[in-house]
Image (tube, rainbow, N blue to C red):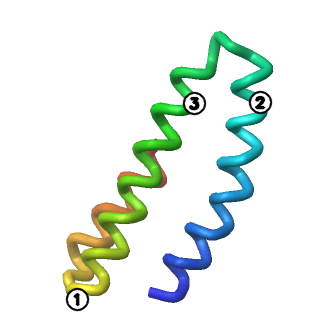
Amino acid sequence: MQDQFKIKDNFKIVQDTLKVLSQRIVDIQSFVMEKISEINENFKKGIDLLEERRSGEASNNQRRIRKI
């Protein structure tokens, strides 16, 4: 579970970079913001599932994050 938090924290750097980039290139802004939202939702779900000790479902959720 610590790895999940570490990955989420590392993603914040990527997220900030993508937000700045999307502000400069307006054509990609809505797409980037949508994907960032999806990733953050899946991080939250994954952490919740791990806290509930539902590791199988959490693994599926992590796979969804990688496909985004």
Q: Do the residues labelled 2 and 1 touch (CB within 8 Å)?
A: no
Q: CA separation, marks 1 and 3?
A: 31 Å
SS of the residue under disc 2:
helix
Residue type at mark 2 is Leu
- The residue at 26%/81% (across/down) is 55
Q: Residue 32, which numbered label?
A: 3
Q: Residue 53, which numbered label?
A: 1
Query: Mark 3 Cα within 10 Å, few/some/many (few <14, many 20+)?
Result: some
Query: Mark 2 Cα within 10 Å, few/some/many (few <14, many 20+)?
Result: some
Q: CA separation, marks 2 and 1?
A: 37 Å
Is residue 12 placed above or below 29 in the rendered structure?
A: below
Say which of marks 2 and 1 sits in front. 2
Image location of residue 26, percent across then percent down: 68, 13
Which label's residue is closer to the chain start, 3 or 2? Answer: 2
Q: Is residue 11 left or right of residue 16?
A: left
- The residue at 22%/76% (across/down) is 56
User: According to the image, label 2 marks what residue?
Assistant: 21
